[in-house]
Image (cartoon, rainbow, N blue to C red):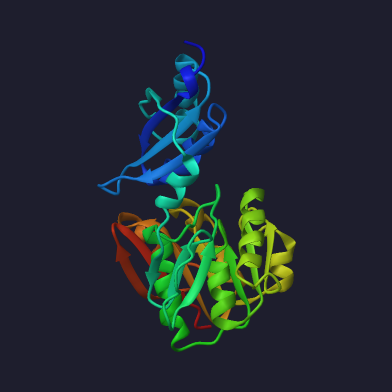
Amino acid sequence: MSGAARGFLWMIACKVPPDAVDVFEEYLRQYCGAVSSIIGAKESQWRLEGLSEVEPDRERVESGARALARDTGFDAPSFKYDLVPPINWVAENLASFPPIRWERYFVHGSHYDEAIPGGTVPLKLDAGTAFGSGEHPTTGGCLLALDKLAKRHQFKRPLDVGCGSGILSIASAKTWGAPVLATDIDPESVLVTKANAHLNGVGDLVSSTVSDGYKNRRIAKNGPYDLITSNILARPLAKMAKSLGQQLAVGGFAVISGVVVRDAQWMVTSHRMAGLHLVEHTTLKGWSTLVFHRRQ
């Protein structure tokens, strides 16, 4: 069967460790019109699901995945292929994005039309294909860290590296009323951040641009920063620790996540070498959020 019968779609699914999600999610996009990632019950494995209107070439999918695994050092995943019935994906997406509260921050989709709880900072998001709809433990951990920092500190120049949907950039802009520079290696995430910033009434405060880590010259030109947020993955965080230290102002704070608990000490060590001191480490459903301070 070369196509999906009567509106049915082909689903390609596999399980990968957290650090391999970005690699294999991007790989599946060449075969699928839509790809989603779902955290597993044991936190150590994520399920990737891709949907295609035509039956995938299984040998090609699997041989390509093996080659990618060799190049990246990850284990090649096993794939499952199923025909799935047509679904109202808009309704499904809205149902899977209920509002959630992280202390002062109330995160909800643009479809939410009920009352906003009093005393909260509302964050209205349409994540699209960008990471950061607010329900993931890493996003929640970062928002909880920002809530604590807001009780004792005022920031004037935040930077958000790996902005995704822009949720942390928007939270910083709404909390401190400060101009925020948001960057991401993915051009689509930059556009999503810009759209979400306008949706939240802070389009004049959040400026988003494409950057591979800290390489965009605009970052150095606008720095140093008294607050840096970065919710990505452990490997790039460790690689960029020195750059983060260089861009963080004396007395500034950095909030990082996207780190499974077993990699937390790796983050502490790599950022200590960059001159940063750990001031808080919280865990949420197997994920770590770390707050660092630059004393001098």
Residue 252: percent from left, percent from top: 54, 80
The answer to whether residue 277 of the structure is visible from this angle is no
- As drawn, 98 above or below 250: above
Q: Is residue 177 above or below residue 72?
A: below
* Residue 179, position as x, y percentages in the image: 66, 76
Residue at 49%, 56% (x, y): give it.
232
In the rendered image, residue 190, in percent from the top left (x then y), is placed at 65, 56
The residue at the point 43 percent across, 83 percent down is 119
Horizontal relation, residue 175 to residue 18: left or right: right
Up-down relation of residue 251 to residue 289 (above or below): below
Left or right of 139: which side holds 245? Answer: right
Residue located farthest toward the bottom when viewing the structure as drawn: 152
Give the quadrant of residue 75: top left
Residue 224 visible in the shown view:
yes
**How far from the left and from the top, in percent, is residue 101?**
38, 70
| Left or right position of 166 against 146 | right
In the depicted view, which residue is nearer to us: 295 or 222?
222
**Occupied quadrant, residue 195:** bottom right
- How many marks can you see? 0
At 43% from the left edge and 68% from the top edge, which residue is drawn?
142
